[in-house]
Image (cartoon, rainbow, N blue to C red):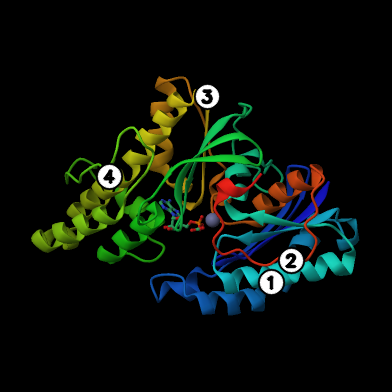
Amino acid sequence: MLILGIETSCDETAAAVIKDNKILSNVVHSQLALHAQYGGVVPELASRAHIRNISSVIEAAIKTSGYRYSDLDGIAVTRGPGLVGALLVGIATAKGLSLALNRPLLAVHHLEGHLISPFLDSQAILPQTTIDQTEIDYPFIALLVSGGHTLLLYVEKFGHYRLLGQTQDDAVGEAFDKGARLLDLPYPGGPAISKLSLQGDNKAVPFPRVLLDRKKFNFSYSGLKTALRVFLLKNPQFAKEPHLRQDLAASYQEALIQPLVIKSIAACKKYQCQHLIIAGGVGANLRLREALKQQADQYSLHTHFPPIPLCADNGAMIALAGGLRLAKGENHGIHWNAQPRWPIETLS
Ligand code: KG4
Ligand code: ZN
């Protein structure tokens, strides 16, 4: 099945063509430079940039795939959650294509796309990447970590999600971004903190591990950002001296990551799942990957991460989710609208 996937929920204008689960093309136009000067995504600017770029991004995805529009079996687009103005650009374009080509249209949940991204075969576009050969078995636990979400799901099978817990305040990606701002690092903060941490001692500054109720799977990140701010006020030398900055970044990163590791492993044990999938922008964090793998090995659990370029928003994951739904006989037509807030547990 040949599917075009379109994603415009936040600050990436993305389109991809996949054949079954194989990525043939994956085009992402990032708006990072546009939003960096404001330290975060400005919704109105995001919508306008999507409008400017969507046609050329889709055109490039089709062209690189080696197929034509008329070869497509279906079109998938992100319906939500996300910024309403940004979502509408992708949705209007996808509806137009669906009508013009007379092909089924699939309205995809952004997080469903993220969580099945480790099932994508990216060999054709990322030939250097080593592919994890371990087959993923349902049920599995999914840890979704991005700039807007931090949640743990029990995934019984494709389309059936039970929410085990989520952040009570900031998302972990947001905590990376806000922490980076306090350290005068560029937006987005995740990659910047991660890079600064490489040479740092992650035990140098004793940030608390915010675990809330140990038996539950909720997270909280707003307190850590405040802890960082207070620490910097009391210890201004940590903002200036290069070695101390590295130690502070590494310690802060560790405090953000440890609750994710502890709760993901605990969820695998409680729900007797052998497989743990990690997805979303923060899934690119090398320390998170290392710490999770280390813990998972101890309990003979398998961790599955998408290749780093597929952790961020992309059209391929949307195409895969749409293709799986099309294969189940779904076709959502054009009579639906964007859903900026859309709890994933309501899917089936
Ligand atoms: O999934 P994503 O691309 O967009 C959404 O939020 O949906 O995630 C973006 C988030 C940002 O907060 C960014 O700082 C974070 O992912 N991020 C990282 C890394 N790369 C991106 N966080 C930690 N370490 C990274 N290497
Ligand atoms: Zn995302």
Helix, strand or loop under label 3 = loop
Q: Name the amino acid, label 2.
A: Ile
Residue 47 percent across, percent down from the top left: 58, 76
What distance separates the C-alpha of mark 4 from that of mark 3? 25 Å
Residue receiving disc 4: 255
**Does mark 2 have its CB less than 8 Å from ligand 2?**
no
**Residues at discs 4 and 3 in contact (Cβ within 8 Å):** no
Q: Is residue 33 visible?
A: yes
Q: What residue type is labelled 3?
A: Gln
Q: Which of the two labelled residues, at mark 4 and mark 1, occupies the earlier sequence position?
A: 1
The quadrant in which residue 133 appears is: top right
Q: Residue 227 carries which label?
A: none
| Image position of 217 with respect to 248: above or below | above
Q: In this view, does 227 lie to the left or right of 270?
A: left
**Would you name the residue on which mark 2 appears?**
58
x, y percentage for residue 327?
Answer: 80, 43
- Marks 2/1 in contact by CB < 8 Å: the verdict is yes
Circle 3 residue: 274
Which badge, 4 or 3, is on the more N-terminal residue?
Answer: 4
Q: Does the residue labelled 1 lie within 8 Å of ligand 2?
A: no
In the picture of the structure, the residue carrying the numbered disc 1 is: 54
